[in-house]
Image (tube, coloured by chain):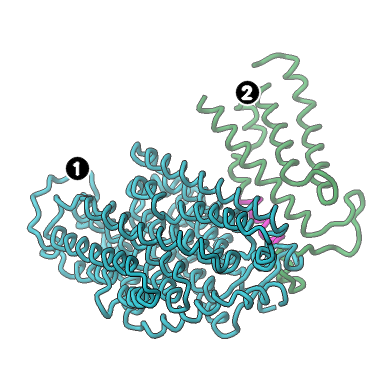
Chain colours: A cyan, B green
């Protein structure tokens, strides 16, 4: 059966997580196994992606129980793309964390937990069952709690409490929504739900359930006005953890929103209004947050929020081109955000601070590194032909077509603020002649690292920078991919047929 | 809490509870029970032993740190779950059954191995948590 391949990305991560647990006492062996495991995961994800691209949607019924009763795993182009992006980011972050995470943290099982997190992400993208989606979310947040608290510094625990409280709240709301939905429709399979929910007469109740899902996923994705946990907690763990959090965790929320609101809750006018206004407000408020901060990691955290707005905007407009724009933005954003946080880790290693005021002179001292770092920064701004430009173009055009000038305003405002923030960051951190910093005793500065360790920090950044360049210059390929995903998402009948009539 | 009554009783209760946990594990496929509950009962046996004789005695009895049981259980469950892919080309987690029933146990399939894996993981996790808390208290 060719369908087995749907589960391989999940199984590979699970297998390597277990193998890593066997080597609990040998950090050195863990490092090699983790990188090797992520290479295998990358190969399997590419294989899955190519298969899906050629054969179309594949489904597998675990335990051989038929569709509405057992748990189905569905790999359509959207899921396969996100699994591929997870593998790319996971590969980069595993190299980076091998190079940067302190030995004391690695000894407490950092790497196995990282693999469990990637396992949860792959599962969430591939599952076709709404309750199973909840289970994957739990695996993701439990692993992320460990990653965010490992090391046990005071500020880490403080951030973790905020992160923990709001994410548990989101999970509870999500679970409540599932319970209500199950009471209404009597099924948990997403394809089956799509049919049954459309037949329910009491639309008011359906809309309330949809809002519950929107709030639950909205907290996880960092939407206005529920994003305050994100900048309060993301700057506390080590940069490698921030990279995987910033790159992938909030995007799972976005993925779940797009999935639920294209398959199950389709065509509610009331929802469209809410999604669009939340998207606009997220764009504006995230942008303003990024303006006022001095810590580069906090600036990036607010930019995450700001840019989530673009994706939700595409979902709200609900046309083929708009959703394709949102998907394109999602693809670009995962790669760039992962890279930005790894970059801030590199800057911290070079200078010993995250504060923009104290940083400076990076371009003078490390011209080659600065040249690499400008790629993700400018991609984020969206200077054509780099990757951020194309999806924004699509989103602005579609807002024009919808005659919604408030939205165009919000999009342009957010774009302009991003440009301003990144330009300020570039002048402050790279161009400015920085103040003389006191050398911190016992701090492992970048210049003191061995050649091997330096390579472990730079290789993942260069790798992701090249992927960003490809997304920008090979925009035609990515656009074709996004349009295909958008068509699949809008035609939910195809999804239903793939699951229920294999 | 070292009383002679509890200490004497725990010597007899430990094997009894362990046997009972295996019984619960085996009946789990069609009746209430299974790996999770069985694992909890097995860990209760060791916790009771630790209460009566002190943690050091129980650790000595176990020989290995219970944390090592976690990956062992996980890999058993993992292999049981992927076995149908390789044996009969059926989806992940499909039940594979031996043709003939074994004496005493009855029909044996991959579900039993999966449950055994869960049993071992649960023993490992709960004992690790309880031992850690007891040590730091």
Badge 1: few (under 14), some or many (20 or more) residues near its Cα, within 10 Å?
A: few
Q: Determine which quarter of the picture holds residue A261.
A: bottom right
Report the residue at 67% width, 29% height from top. B47
Nearer to us in this view, A118 or A193: A193
A184 vs A143, left or right, is right
How far across and how far down the image is residue A155, in percent? Answer: 33, 39
Report the residue at 71% width, 71% height from top. B86
How far across and how far down the image is residue A81, in percent? Answer: 49, 73
Q: Is residue A319 above or below residue A165?
A: below
Q: Which residue is mark 2?
A: B54
Residue range highlighted in magenta? B71-82
Q: Where's the N terminus of chain A, which quadrant?
A: bottom right
The overriding secondary structure of the stretch rendered in magenta is: helix
A186 vs A486, left or right, is right
- Identify the element where label 2 is drawn: loop
A323 vs A130, left or right, is left
Nearer to us in this view, B49 or B93: B93
Q: Is residue B14 visible?
A: yes
Name the chain under label 1: A
Residue B77 is covered by the magenta coloring:
yes
How far across and how far down the image is residue A397, in percent? Answer: 35, 78
Report the residue at 74% width, 51% height from top. B115
Spatial CA distance of label 1 from label 2 is: 45 Å
Q: Which residue is mark 1?
A: A441
- Identify the element where label 1 is drawn: loop
Badge 2: few (under 14), some or many (20 or more) residues near its Cα, within 10 Å?
A: some
**Viewer-side label of 1, 2:** 1
How far across and how far down the image is residue A98, in percent? Answer: 38, 57
Task: Check residue A325 in the rendering and tell me which mark sits there, or answer none.
Answer: none
Q: Is residue A18 visible?
A: no
């Amino acid at each position: 059966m060719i369908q087995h391949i749907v589960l391989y990305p999940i199984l590979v991560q699970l297998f390597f997580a277990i193998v890593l647990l066997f080597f609990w006492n040998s950090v050195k062996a863990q490092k090699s196994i983790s990188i090797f495991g992520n290479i295998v995961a990358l190969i399997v994800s590419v294989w899955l992606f190519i298969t899906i691209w050629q054969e179309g949607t594949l489904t597998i019924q675990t335990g051989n129980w038929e569709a509405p009763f057992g748990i189905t795993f569905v790999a359509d182009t959207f899921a396969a793309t996100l699994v591929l992006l997870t593998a790319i980011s996971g590969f980069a972050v595993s190299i980076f964390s091998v190079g940067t995470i302190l030995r004391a943290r690695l000894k407490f099982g950092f790497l196995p937990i990282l693999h469990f997190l990637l396992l949860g992400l792959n599962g969430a993208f591939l599952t076709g069952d709404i309750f199973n989606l909840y289970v994957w979310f739990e695996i993701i947040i439990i692993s992320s709690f460990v990653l965010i608290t490992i090391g046990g510094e005071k500020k880490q625990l403080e951030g973790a409490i905020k992160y923990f409280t709001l994410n548990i709240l989101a999970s509870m709301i999500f679970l409540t929504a599932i319970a209500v939905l199950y009471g209404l429709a009597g099924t948990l399979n997403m394809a089956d739900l799509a049919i049954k929910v459309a037949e329910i007469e009491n639309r008011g109740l359906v809309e309330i359930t949809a809002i519950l899902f929107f709030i639950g996923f909205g907290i996880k994705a960092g939407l206005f006005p529920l994003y305050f946990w994100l900048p309060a907690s993301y700057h506390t763990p080590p940069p490698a953890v921030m990279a995987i959090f910033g790159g992938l965790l909030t995007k799972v929320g976005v993925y779940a929103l797009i999935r639920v609101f294209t398959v199950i809750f389709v065509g509610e006018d009331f929802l469209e209004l809410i999604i669009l206004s939340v998207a606009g407000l997220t764009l504006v408020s995230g942008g303003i947050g990024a303006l006022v901060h001095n810590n580069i990691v906090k600036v990036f955290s607010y930019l995450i929020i700001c840019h989530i707005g673009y994706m939700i905007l595409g979902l709200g407009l609900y046309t083929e081109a708009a959703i394709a724009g949102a998907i394109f933005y999602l693809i670009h954003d995962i790669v760039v955000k992962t890279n930005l946080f790894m970059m801030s880790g590199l800057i911290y290693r070079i200078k010993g601070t995250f504060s923009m005021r104290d940083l400076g002179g990076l371009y003078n001292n490390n011209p080659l590194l600065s040249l690499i770092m400008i790629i993700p920064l400018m991609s984020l701004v969206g200077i054509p032909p780099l990757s951020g430009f194309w999806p924004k173009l699509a989103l602005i055009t579609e807002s024009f077509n919808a005659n919604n000038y408030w939205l165009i305003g919000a999009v342009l405002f957010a774009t302009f603020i991003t440009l301003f923030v990144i330009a300020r960051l570039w002048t402050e951190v790279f161009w400015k002649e920085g103040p003389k910093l006191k050398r911190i005793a016992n701090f492992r500065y970048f210049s003191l690292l061995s050649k091997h360790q330096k390579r472990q920090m730079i290789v993942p950044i260069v790798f992701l920078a090249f992927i960003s360049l490809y997304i920008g210059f090979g925009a035609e390929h990515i656009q074709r991919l996004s349009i295909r995903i958008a068509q699949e998402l809008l035609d939910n009948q195809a999804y239903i047929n793939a699951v229920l009539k294999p | 809490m070292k009383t002679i009554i509890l200490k004497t009783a725990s010597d007899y209760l430990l094997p009894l509870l362990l046997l009972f946990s295996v019984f619960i594990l085996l009946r789990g496929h069609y009746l209430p029970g299974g790996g999770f509950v069985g694992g909890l009962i097995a860990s209760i046996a060791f916790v009771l032993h630790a209460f009566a004789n002190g943690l050091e005695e129980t650790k000595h009895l176990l020989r290995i740190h219970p944390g090592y049981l976690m990956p062992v259980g996980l890999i058993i469950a993992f292999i049981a779950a992927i076995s149908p892919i390789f044996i009969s080309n059926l989806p992940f987690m499909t039940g594979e059954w031996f043709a003939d029933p074994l004496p005493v146990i009855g029909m044996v399939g991959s579900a039993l191995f999966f449950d055994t894996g869960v049993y071992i993981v649960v023993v490992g996790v709960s004992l690790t948590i309880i031992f850690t808390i007891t040590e730091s208290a």
